[in-house]
Image: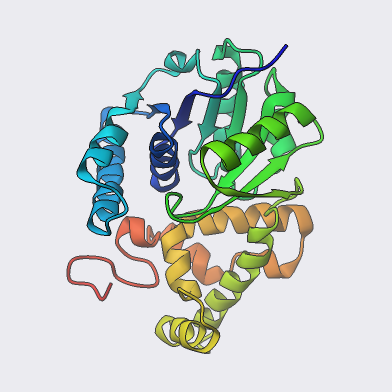
Amino acid sequence: MTVPEIERVAVIGCGTMGSGVAEVLARAGLEVHVLVSSAPSERAGRGRLGKSLDRAVRKNKLTESDRAAIVDRIRFTTELGALEDRQLVVEAIGEDDAAKTALLRDLSKVLRDPDAIVATTTSAIPIVRLARVTDRPGQVVGMHFFNPAPVLPLVELIGSVLTTDETMARADHFVTDVLGKQVIESPDRAGFVVNALLFPYLLSAIRMVGDGTATPEVIDRAMVKGCAHPMGPLALADLIGLDTTVAIADAMYEEFKQPLYAPPPLLSRMVEGGLLGKKSGRGFYDYSENGSR
């Protein structure tokens, strides 16, 4: 029996990544349900979507009519049961192992379609750890978009030892042919491919700030002007979110126990102090109205 094309999709969470993924799906002409935790979360999510779409219109990437059509394809809900008919659900909540595990366990009981794919945008948590708590481990994949999701072309696709070949093929087809993204298949290990390379670099830069080797401005300028990076490592950590940076580093250190993955003390203190980067208004740089960024 032929499995139908994926048309009914959902995203859980509408933070930086969730709103970006929802936009990508809606831009592809799909009907998108977005599950949020509360009315304030919905307002914040709509705001992120609006700013991103407005930016695309200003840059002539979208017309005003395109923008309106994309917004019309997105529906918000606070009820998990509203996702029961979805053929693909992308989980995009915070990088919290226990929260993701509990959510995917509940989600798998709601979905009616036995072939529905459950995708997680986790940056570092092994997929098998999340898949094994569901009643459909063969249909669980990692679908790791990069921020900003509407702009960056790459998606890491990760299957666990429990994921079926058919699920991987359907997910690859969907991301490549429906969303128009480029796929690399990554091994199911903490950090996958991209973050396993990226995060030692980010953490090394943070250590340099912590031990007084150089300021964030000097380090970022060095890497932008000297190595042609589009963004310096401290600005990138602020964009990712310093809390997310800690969570990813912790997950990789837990698996490999290598010092290069350990969160530097400065990073941990900043997160404890609520300095989370751009989303909180301050990290290594000040993003407030009177700030330098």
Residue 212, above or below 175: below
Q: 230 left or right of 165? A: left
Residue 227, above or below 248: below
Residue 177 visible in the picture: yes
Residue 8, above or below 23: above
Q: Residue at x 62, y 25 (%)?
A: 117
Q: 119 left or right of 81? A: right
Q: What x and y, as percent, mark residue 193?
A: 70, 57
Image quarter where the N terminus lies is top right
Q: What x and y, as percent, mark residue 168?
A: 72, 34
Q: Residue at x 46, y 81 (%)?
A: 220
Residue 140: name its quadrant. top right
**Of the pair 106 and 268, the residue shown nearer to us:** 106
Q: How many marks?
A: 0
Residue 287, above or below 127: below
Q: What x and y, as percent, mark residue 46?
A: 27, 38
Residue 164 visible in the picture: no
Q: 209 left or right of 122? A: left
Residue 43: name its quadrant. top left
Residue 276: name its quadrant. bottom left
Q: What x and y, as percent, mark residue 72?
A: 27, 28
Image quarter where the C terminus lies is bottom left
Determine the residue located farthest toward the right in the rendered image.
Answer: 161
Instruction: Give the colour scheme of this rendering.
Output: rainbow
**Of the pair 70 and 158, the residue shown nearer to us:** 70
Q: Residue at x 66, y 65 (%)?
A: 262
